[in-house]
Image (spheres, rainbow, N blue to C red):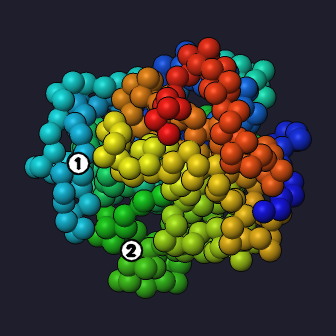
């Protein structure tokens, strides 16, 4: 593996890759600020330089909006949470709240004020970390629509999501929806100084758009076939382009999950490549779009290896060695300058406590940190593993107690 330092908007340092990140999902399970600061301490120790915070989703809205206050007063609390793995449901039924699910009957809530987030941004800077905020759109909007039903075409009152999976309820993408997004992203830009603003863009079912005469009209105005479901990917591209233009007007660059290029490149953007079955990294670099590698190998909400031997998780995952041997340039070696770096994901559907969070994150985050900072010059696996005990102890001293090394 060879590396070069690609052009980036992040502060420059000596790392092989400019973007060395971890994504923390605080929407599914709220994480107290004190624990986020603890994670920042660990990131400083490991030379990880980006904390991507997933602030909104179907199951909770955690960013305080002064213009749309019900996003937190209503959207910040769900009535209950699904227990264990979700029930099996057919591919035709995207709705995750089905009759096979079992719930805990307990409300779950929490959000961060703008003042708290500004302080967190300033604190992260002292640790050498940039915080990249994510407001997921136009899918994963169930909590927002619970607060403001008018964000959907039909105005139906939904509750905040209580199950996991893909909800079919998404954002309307005509002018009322666009203005909502401009309002929220404007506030986000006021709070966060990150050069990148993440807008999600993933897992957006097109069912409501296909059923809406308003969306049908938009598709026709774009010169597309309103009866062809594949054309609605291009409606999402159009929407994403509007957000890219708005963010550019605020001096920021749009970052999104790889679905944002399904209908074509939506302007100046960076793709976070996660879906292995669509070869997003290869597609993006062919289109000359910069990428951050975020494959399922780096999904640390998945078990350390075989799920049957581990605490509840979404499924089998990478072992420590498999994580350490990941190559961010695999398949895109001819354009290394477009690979900004890599990122580990900590989705929190099955991570209800911070103790569980650290168990899932460490020591695999050490592997990601070394890949990002040292690149091709990182130590061979045996040498890395031999020196791991002292590094694990240093993290434990910060309160970041991961999976015991003797379980490897």
202 or 148, which is in the foreground? 202
Whole-percent x, y for residue 2 in the image: 83, 62
* Location of residue 205 with respect to 307 vertically, above or below: below
The quadrant in which the N terminus is found is: bottom right
Which callout, 2 or 1, points to the residue nearer the camera?
Answer: 1
Residue drawn at 60 percent across, 61 percent down: 273
* Residue neighbourhood size for the residue with mark 1, other residues' Cα within 10 Å, grouped as few (<14), some (14–19), many (≥20): some
| Distance in Å between CA atoms under marks 2 and 1 | 33 Å
* Location of residue 137 with respect to 309 vertically, above or below: below
Indicate left or right for 395 with 56 as reference.
Answer: right
Q: Secondary structure at mark 2?
A: helix
Indicate left or right for 348 with 362 as reference.
Answer: left
Residue drawn at 19 percent across, 65 percent down: 90
107 or 137, which is in the foreground? 107
Residue drawn at 42 percent across, 59 percent down: 203
Whole-percent x, y for residue 329 in the image: 73, 64
221 or 185, which is in the foreground? 185
236 or 109, which is in the foreground? 109
* Residue neighbourhood size for the residue with mark 2, other residues' Cα within 10 Å, grouped as few (<14), some (14–19), many (≥20): some
* Identity of the residue furthest to the left in this view: 99
Residue drawn at 84 percent across, 43 percent down: 15
- Which residue is tagged 1? 86
- Which residue is tagged 2? 216
Whole-percent x, y for residue 269 in the image: 70, 59
Can residue 281 be seen at all in this image of the molecule? yes
Q: Secondary structure at mark 1?
A: loop
* Location of residue 202 with respect to 120 vertically, above or below: below
Indicate left or right for 335 with 154 as reference.
Answer: right
Indicate left or right for 193 with 73 as reference.
Answer: right
């Amino acid at each position: 593996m060879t590396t070069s330092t690609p052009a980036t908007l992040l502060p420059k340092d000596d790392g092989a890759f400019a973007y060395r990140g971890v994504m923390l999902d605080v929407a599914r399970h709220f994480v107290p600020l004190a624990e986020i600061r603890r994670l920042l301490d660990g990131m400083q120790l490991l030379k990880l330089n980006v904390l991507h915070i997933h602030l909104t989703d179907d199951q909770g809205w955690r960013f305080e909006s002064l213009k749309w206050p019900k996003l937190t007063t209503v959207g910040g609390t769900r009535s209950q949470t699904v227990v264990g793995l979700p029930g099996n449901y057919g591919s035709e039924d995207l709705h995750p709240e089905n009759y096979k699910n079992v719930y805990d009957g307990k409300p779950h809530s929490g959000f961060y004020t703008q003042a708290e987030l500004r302080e967190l941004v300033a604190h992260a800077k002292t640790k050498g970390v940039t915080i990249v905020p994510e407001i997921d759109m136009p899918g994963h909007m169930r909590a927002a629509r619970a607060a403001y039903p008018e964000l959907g075409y039909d105005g139906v009152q939904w509750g905040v999501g209580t199950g996991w999976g893909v909800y079919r309820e998404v954002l309307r993408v005509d002018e009322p929806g666009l203005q909502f997004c401009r309002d929220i992203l404007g506030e986000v830009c006021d709070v966060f100084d990150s050069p990148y603003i993440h807008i999600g863009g993933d897992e957006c079912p097109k069912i409501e758009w296909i059923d809406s005469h308003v969306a049908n009209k938009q598709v026709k105005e774009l010169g597309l076939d309103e009866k062809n479901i594949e054309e609605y990917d291009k409606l999402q591209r159009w929407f994403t382009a509007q957000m890219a233009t708005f963010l550019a007007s605020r001096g920021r660059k749009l970052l999104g999950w790889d679905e944002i290029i399904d209908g074509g490149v939506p302007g100046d953007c960076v793709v976070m490549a996660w879906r292995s079955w669509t070869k997003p990294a290869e597609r993006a670099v062919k289109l000359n779009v910069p990428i951050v590698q975020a494959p399922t190998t780096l999904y640390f909400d998945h078990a350390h290896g075989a799920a049957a031997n581990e605490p509840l998780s979404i499924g089998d995952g990478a072992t420590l060695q498999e994580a350490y041997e990941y190559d961010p340039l695999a398949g895109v070696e001819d354009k290394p300058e477009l690979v900004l770096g890599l990122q580990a994901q900590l989705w929190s559907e099955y991570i209800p406590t911070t103790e569980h969070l650290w168990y899932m994150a460490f020591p695999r985050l050490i592997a990601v940190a070394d890949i990002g900072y040292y690149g091709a010059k990182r130590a061979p696996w045996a040498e890395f593993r031999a020196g791991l005990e002292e590094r694990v102890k240093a993290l434990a001293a910060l309160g970041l107690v991961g999976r015991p090394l003797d379980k490897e």
